[in-house]
Image (spheres, rainbow, N blue to C red):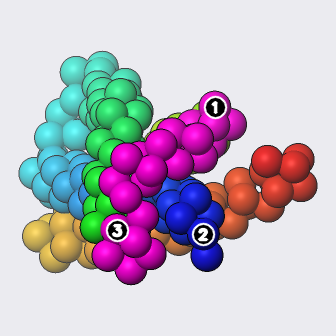
Amino acid sequence: LSHDAAAAEICTLPLHAALPIGLLVLGRLGASFAAQLASMQANEEIDALRALGVDPVDYLVLPRLLALLIVAPPLLACAALVGVVAGLPAASAIYGVPPHEYLQACLNALTWTHLWIGLFKGVLYAALVALAGCREGLYAGRNAQAVGVATTSAVVKALVWIVTAACGTTAVFQALGF
């Protein structure tokens, strides 16, 4: 491979940061959401909210969902930047690409289409993780064992939903020519 082709190939890898971030970091947050809400369910705190006339979805789920939707874009940008920087030693050592050529190829490989698709996918994955965690937490049983079951179930559902969404969005974007 030429220097430009090798650098461009390595530079496009961080543009796919949404999936690993969704699986690793956001999956951890979804488990946390499930554990928090399942503990509240076990302690009958959610029933107390309902008795006070407060909708648990509005009070407990929406803030968590909005938090992940707000945090997802900067987290994705950070992951993509780390991926570009992490590719620099590989491009230099394996392919002999000078650092300035590598960084220039990264800038050339980056398009607005890549940015918007990556952002869309990342936000979609964040929403799926938040919804999986909150759903499992709200519908957990009323004992300590149910907290663990809800947490595990939230992680599994979030992973399945993310992989399914990744396949679906990739197929749609491929069909649209992106």
Q: Write down the residue under mark 1.
A: 112
| CA distance separating discs 3 and 1 | 26 Å
104 within the magenta span: yes
Q: Write down the residue under mark 2.
A: 2
| Residue at point 79%, 48% (across, down) | 178
Sequence order check: which comes first, mark 3 or mark 1?
3
| CA distance separating discs 2 and 1 | 25 Å
- Secondary element at tag 3: helix
Picture quadrant where residue 139 is located: bottom left
For label 3, count other residues whose C-alpha is less than 10 Å away and answer few (under 14), some (14-19) or many (20+).
Answer: some
For label 2, count other residues whose C-alpha is less than 10 Å away and answer few (under 14), some (14-19) or many (20+).
Answer: few
Q: Write down the residue under mark 3.
A: 92
Sequence order check: which comes first, mark 2 or mark 3?
2
Q: Disc 3 marks which amino acid?
A: Ser
Q: Disc 1 marks which amino acid?
A: Trp
- Does the magenta stretch mainly form a helix, a strand or a loop? helix
What span is colored magenta in the figure?
91-115
Report x, y in % for residue 153.
Answer: 36, 72
